[in-house]
Structures are given as C-alpha cells and as structure tokens.
Amino acid sequence: MMLGTWSFSARGCERAWPQLVVGGESLDAVCAAAREAEVDPTVNSVGFGGLPDANGQVSLDACVMVAPNRCGAVCAVTRHLCVTDLARLVMETTPHVMLAGEGADVFADSLGMAASVLLSADAKSAWLKWRSGDVSGGTTDHGIDRGAAIGVASAASAIGERMVAHDTIGVLAIDTRGVMAGACSTSGLPYKRSGRVGDSPIPGHGLYVDPEVGGAVATGNGELIMGVSGSFLAVECIRRGATPAQAVHEVLERIERHFHPGPEQQIGVIALARDGTWSAGALRTGFAVSVADGAGIRAVAPEFVLHGAPHDEGRST
Ligand code: GLY
C-alpha cells in the first residue's frame, strides 16, 4: 500500500503503484512518487514550481528513510531538481545522513546529475506580487486545484481539501515483502528567510520509519512539527501501544498545547503501523490523504480534524 500527503500525491502513487504491486521495492515507489511532484510545475510547494524564499531563490529539501540506520537527506539545494533521488544517493553512497546547501549541489554535480532552473514563471510572478505587497497573488492560499491534473478532482473537492501553505509531499509505502519506506520533499515555507530549513529533510520531524514499528509523515508549518519531533513522536506512540489514530492525535494535541496555532497554520500527519493499519489527522479542515491499495488510488479526508466541524470527522473509506 501507499499513503501520501494531499491529493496531488495520488499522481505519484499512480506512477509508482504498477511496479509496487508486482514486487517492486517500497523505496523505489516512494522516490518515484516524490519525483512526480518535484517535476510537476503545478505543485507550488515541491520541486520545480515551488515558491521561492524572500530573495526569489528556490531551495529544496528532501529525506528518504527505511530504518534508523538507513536514511538520507539534503537541504537548501538550489541547483538540482530531483532532491529525493539525491537524498537516496546520500544514504546509499556516503557515510553521512544529510548534505546541505552548496555541498549537496556539488555532490549532485559529482554524480553527473544535470543542474536545473528551479524557479518557474508562475512562482516568479507570485514572488514579485508578494514582494510588491500584493498578497492576493497567493502567499498563503496556493489556490490550485491540483486534483484536476490527476483525475481525483471531484474527490478532492468533495472532501473539502484546502491547501494553505507548505504542502510538503510525504509518502509511505509497504511493498510485497513487507518492507516499509518513506520519502518527503518540499520547497519549504513560501518567501521564507534565506537559509531557513524546516522539518521535511530531518529524520524524525517530517518523516520517520522504524521497521520494527511503522512510519509517519507530517506536512504543514515545519516550525511546529520540529518543536515536537512530529513523525518520531507518532512512531514512538505506536511503539508504546497506541493505535495510529491515537498516535496522530497525540502529535496534533502536543502541537496545539505548545504553539496554540492560529487559523492560518495547518498540520497534517499520517501514521502507518507495520501491520498496514493507518490513520491521518489534521489541525483543521482542508487536509487530504492519497491512498493506494487493493481498492484503488484515491484521495480521502483524514480520520479526524482537531478543530473540525462534526461533519469533517470520519474518513470516507
Ligand atoms: N513542512 C515543510 C516546511 O515547513 O518546510
């Protein structure tokens, strides 16, 4: 099975699923799913098309994880697009876990990875509007019906998906051998201060996988997720006997308790136990989860919303 944050990750699931069901590796599946979002210019929070920092510079972060002793990450990459693949190469070909900034780009050069321009025309125009003070250009409301591109538009709109910012792609997969892997990729907070790095590339924050227990991904304001080590916390709750739903609830409640997040701040968390049971929740309405399993590929509402109206509760599958 595969699970991903937001409806746009369904497109990545569609790309990866045919290989996964015939015995492909979960690590290949999550990398393929993240890559799909990285090259998609309509996803303005990941890869090409991602909104830049305050200086107009796009910088990308990514992480892959299979186990505590098998993870890799890159952050603040400014010249290469497929940062999830680069994170995997850090894991597979170096003794390190994370490479940052120019060092990560130089590592990509040394592997023969082609350099890319990361700032799309649309992202540049949104940044110019933001810089001129015209926030109607979409600083906090990405406003793109990404579902339309992947054939799940009606499902995404029926479940009330509303992406507000920092819509990281986080993907978890279990392959036919029972091996779990996760990947996480983002361009980070739109118009962030130059040098800012969030939760996504840091094992335990945007992504955590422990094959003895399960995995978790988080999306939303990285500062809040980092404050509670969100993904690690979810997996540790499951290790201590919580269900995935209880684990996600604990993460969101802890964020609520420490940060008192405002209405513009959203967090979505997905937890997947090693037996395949899973849950997702969000601070407020608007989050969606892409699911790929024997029943097909679809976007669904999270199981619960901390600040949701009663009709927002309950997964549609
Ligand atoms: N969750 C992505 C970020 O805040 O950078």
Image (cartoon, rainbow, N blue to C red):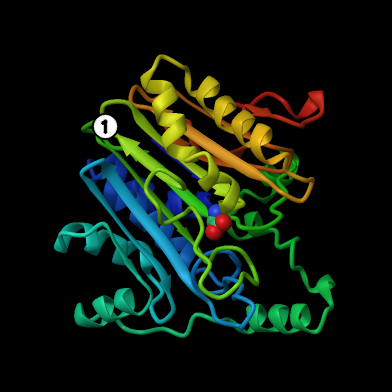
| Quarter of the rendering occupied by the N terminus | top left
Q: Within 10 angstroms of label 1, few (less than 14), some, or many (20 or more) residues?
A: some
Pick the front one: 63 or 289: 63
Q: Is residue 162 above or below residue 68?
A: below
Residue 252 left/right relative to 234: right
Pick the front one: 272 or 238: 238
- Residue 63 picture location, percent across and down: 37, 55
Q: Residue at x 63, y 29 (%)?
A: 253
Q: Is residue 98 above or below residue 309?
A: below
Residue 290 left/right relative to 62: right
Residue 313, by quadrant, is top right
Residue carrying label 1: 211
Q: Residue at x 61, y 83 (%)?
A: 55
Mark 1 residue's CB less than 8 Å from ligand 1: no
Q: Residue at x 49, y 73 (%)?
A: 59
| Quarter of the rendering occupied by the C terminus | top right
Does residue 236 appear in the picture of this structure? yes
User: In which quadrant of this rendering is ligand 1 seen?
Assistant: bottom right
- Residue 298 picture location, percent across and down: 55, 40
Number of numbered discs overlaid on the protein picture: 1
